[in-house]
Image (cartoon, rainbow, N blue to C red):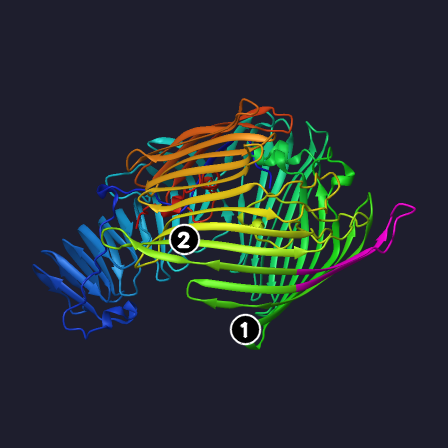
């Protein structure tokens, strides 16, 4: 959906502050005692069917009609309801009590204190000058008048309402009238004003809100903002609770420099399906001079436990959409928008997949011959079947129709049956295997003299073996130290493949996974010839009792007995005896620290081709420090530092800086803070980031105010921080009861 560069958001959510001081806690709810003499368990029955017990500390005057005047402190109990007052008058005909002086009413759903009131055996009542609590919410407030109906509806006049505990009324909802339905857990207010720290921040003639987890249709809190590109911005969401398994959020919005628009989010859940449809539409963008639109569908249907359908579809109106409405550098790196439909059928030992995939070109500067092919369709089958004597048979097969506006198109069929024998024991494994791979094409739009039906076949032989050595270490033998060498020999004869097209094949970066792959290419258009040995060495440090891993380090390299000859167009063939070194090290569990690093190193040239590393310090929930480094020779060199630090139970600071050494400029940076009170939270961030492919920067402000418990449906800006700061999660923080 359209994401604003600058957002000033007044949100109302059920989220609580990350840390709670003792004075912010609500007192424990103590239910009223059952009347003396009632059998155990009767107090939990329907209170309207329970007898009424009346106790008086003073005198009682009773008329012939049964009317009574009670003084000296009165207690009236009916089931789990209890009323206390200085005096009471009982109307026998109406079965109603008139109570006066320090009136207190208690039930599981409501506690109140008032100057006077009335209450009857059906649970209806009227109280004046009342202070009330909803202990199951929890929430509290005051009202000049409070009426309880038999249906469980509270009608309040001249109301003050808050979810803050006593002594900490940081925010307050003021209304001329409020109705709260205890059974449906819904509330409705008229002439409503919301004050934060005594300052009015919002007024509305009508508001609806839940007083429990149930969803309710109605307006959510608006968002406001301002940006250099779009001007003043305001959005007013309206939530529609269509059904327990369907809902819709409509958000009309205004951008002063662009115009009016509408956003919509529709969610659904059925017995076998679930999904979401979202769209943003800005007709006649005043800056772009055209309609702007983004639409997306994410869907999944589980027909059976073995048959599943997925759809992931998206579309934008123009190539600059993500630059104009994105929230950071990620929007500038989108070159293609993937649209696909998938069908998966799982059997015992096999899997059949169907795929229809298309792409929308976002970066129009990409050469048409470098744009991805559509798959219309792709059908793939994989199977694995155990056999007697430790053998196993497997097969990988696929048929794909590749289509594109420019270049060669056509059909590719690829099949690779394989037989392997595994010998495994304590501390070792040996696995020889033999396979045959055949690939055939039916092509269109080829060069005049080119073969329209090229093909390739080749055998594949491999031998994979490894050892695991273990020894105990530490003063108390609390650690387990392992040494794990691994070797894999692969032989694939050379086949001339220059006449084969390149639909989806590429040479990936060399890493520890790729090091032990049979084919050095991904995709079926090239099968690399091989007479080589891949060697790797891994060491681990583990907790002996639990197996918890503290440290792992791996290094590996390929050794060529014959130089590889198969290449992709534009690829330089290997003319040496060994590949580059690849290595990884990971520290996973040492107090509050964790770290990882990876490298690809050219031993002949003595230089680093690719490297990355990160360190994280996480001493407590809500506190995390990250430092990262990424390097790719000739392409990028970036530093990434981020922090979320809890200064106190109420204060937290945030910051991040992504700096490009190659370009000598900041790519993305922000700083801000969060203040968490007992029942509200404020978060403020200032941000500067690269906003388009030309490297221009933009500024943004993110301001969020959360009023705890006012609504159970609303926006969360926490998502931005969760994605920007690895390890930050507000959900891990403590919450109010």
| Residue lying farthest to the top in this orientation | 664
Q: Mark number for residue 734?
A: none
Closer to us: 360 or 130: 360
Where's residue 290, x and y in %? 73, 33
Task: Specify whether 201 is left or right of 530.
Answer: left
Query: Is 449 within the magenta?
Result: yes
Task: Specify whether 192 is left or right of 137.
Answer: right
| Residue lying farthest to the front in this orientation | 561
Closer to us: 133 or 302: 302
Q: Name the residue under label 2.
A: 483
Where's residue 389, x and y in %? 55, 76
Look at the image and tell me whether residue 381 can be seen.
no
Tell me the distance, in whole angstroms, between the alpha carbons under discs 2 and 1: 26 Å
Where's residue 100, x and y in %? 18, 52
| Residue lying farthest to the left in this orientation | 58
Q: In this picture, which residue range is highlighted in magenta? A: 435-460
Query: Badge 1: few (under 14), some or many (20 or more) residues near its Cα, within 10 Å?
Result: few
Question: In the rendered view of the protein, which quadrant contains the N terminus?
Answer: top right
Q: Main secondary structure of the magenta part?
A: strand
Query: Is 196 within the magenta?
Result: no
| Residue lying farthest to the right in this orientation | 448
Residue drawn 25% across and 65% down? 95
Task: Specify whether 330 is left or right of 677.
Answer: right
Q: Mark 1 points at which residue?
A: 390
Look at the image and tell me whether residue 383 can be seen.
yes
């Amino acid at each position: 959906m359209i994401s604003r560069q600058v957002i000033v958001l007044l949100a109302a959510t059920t989220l609580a502050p990350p840390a709670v001081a003792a004075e912010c806690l609500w007192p424990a709810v103590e239910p009223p005692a059952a009347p003396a003499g009632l059998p155990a368990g009767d107090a939990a029955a329907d209170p309207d069917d329970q007898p009424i017990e009346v106790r008086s500390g003073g005198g009682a005057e009773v008329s012939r009609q049964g009317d009574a005047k009670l003084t000296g402190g009165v207690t009236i109990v009916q089931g789990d309801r209890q009323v206390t007052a200085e005096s009471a008058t009982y109307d026998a005909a109406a079965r109603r009590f008139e109570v006066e002086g320090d009136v207190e009413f208690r039930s599981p759903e409501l506690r109140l204190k008032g100057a006077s009131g009335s209450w009857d055996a059906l649970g209806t009542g009227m109280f004046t000058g009342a202070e009330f609590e909803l202990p199951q919410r929890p929430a509290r407030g005051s009202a000049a008048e409070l009426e309880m109906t038999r249906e469980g509806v509270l009608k309040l006049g001249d109301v003050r309402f808050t979810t803050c505990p006593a002594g900490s009324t940081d925010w307050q909802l003021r209304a001329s009238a409020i109705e709260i339905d205890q059974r449906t857990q819904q509330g409705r207010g008229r002439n409503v004003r919301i004050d934060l720290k005594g300052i009015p921040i919002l007024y509305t003639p009508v508001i609806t809100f839940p007083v429990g987890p149930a969803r309710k249709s109605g307006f959510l809190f608006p968002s406001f903002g301002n940006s250099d590109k779009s001007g003043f911005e305001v959005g007013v969401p309206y939530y529609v609770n269509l059904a327990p398994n369907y809902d819709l959020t409509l958000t009309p919005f205004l951008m002063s420099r662009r115009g009016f628009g509408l956003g919509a989010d529709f969610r659904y859940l059925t017995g076998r399906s679930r999904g979401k449809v979202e769209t943003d539409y800005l007709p006649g963008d005043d800056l772009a001079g055209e309609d702007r639109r983004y639409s997306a569908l994410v869907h999944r249907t589980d027909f059976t436990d073995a048959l599943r359908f997925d759809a992931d579809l998206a579309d934008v109106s123009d190539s600059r959409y993500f630059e104009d409405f994105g929230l950071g550098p990620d929007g500038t790196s989108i070159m293609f928008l993937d649209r696909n439909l998938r069908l998966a059928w799982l059997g015992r030992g096999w899997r059949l997949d169907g795929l229809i995939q298309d792409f929308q070109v976002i970066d129009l500067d990409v050469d048409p011959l470098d744009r991805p092919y559509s798959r219309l369709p792709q059908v793939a089958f994989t199977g694995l079947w155990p056999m007697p004597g430790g053998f196993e048979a497997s097969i990988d097969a696929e048929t794909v129709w590749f289509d594109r506006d420019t270049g060669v198109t056509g059909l590719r069929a690829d099949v690779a049956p394989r037989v392997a024998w595994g010998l495994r024991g304590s501390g070792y494994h040996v696995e020889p295997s033999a396979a045959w791979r055949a690939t055939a094409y039916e092509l269109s739009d080829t060069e005049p003299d080119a073969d329209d039906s090229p093909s390739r076949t080749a055998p594949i032989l491999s031998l994979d073996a490894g050892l695991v050595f273990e020894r105990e270490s530490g003063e108390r033998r609390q650690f387990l130290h392992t040494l794990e060498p691994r070797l894999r020999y692969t032989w694939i004869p050379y086949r001339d493949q220059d006449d084969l097209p390149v639909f989806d094949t590429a040479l990936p970066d060399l890493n520890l996974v790729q090091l032990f792959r049979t084919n050095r290419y991904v995709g079926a258009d090239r099968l690399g010839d091989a007479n080589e040995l891949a060697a790797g060495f891994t060491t681990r440090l583990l907790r002996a009792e639990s197996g918890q891993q503290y440290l792992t380090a791996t290094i590996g390299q390929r050794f060529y007995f014959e130089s590889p000859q198969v290449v992709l167009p534009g690829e330089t063939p290997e003319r040496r005896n060994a590949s580059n070194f690849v290595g990884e090290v990971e520290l996973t569990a040492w107090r509050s620290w964790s770290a990882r690093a990876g490298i690809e190193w050219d031993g002949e040239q003595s230089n680093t081709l690719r490297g990355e590393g990160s360190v994280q310090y996480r001493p407590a929930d809500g506190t995390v420090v990250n430092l990262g480094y990424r390097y790719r020779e000739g392409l990028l060199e970036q530093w990434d530092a981020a922090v979320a630090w809890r200064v106190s139970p109420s204060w937290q600071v945030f910051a991040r800086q992504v700096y490009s050494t190659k370009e000598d400029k900041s790519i993305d940076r922000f700083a801000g803070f969060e203040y968490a009170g007992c029942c509200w939270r404020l978060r403020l961030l200032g941000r500067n980031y690269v906003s388009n492919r030309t490297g221009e920067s933009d500024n943004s402000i993110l301001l969020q105010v959360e009023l705890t418990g006012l609504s159970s449906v609303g926006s969360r800006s926490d998502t931005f921080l969760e994605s920007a700061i690895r390890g930050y999660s507000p959900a891990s923080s403590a919450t109010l009861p």
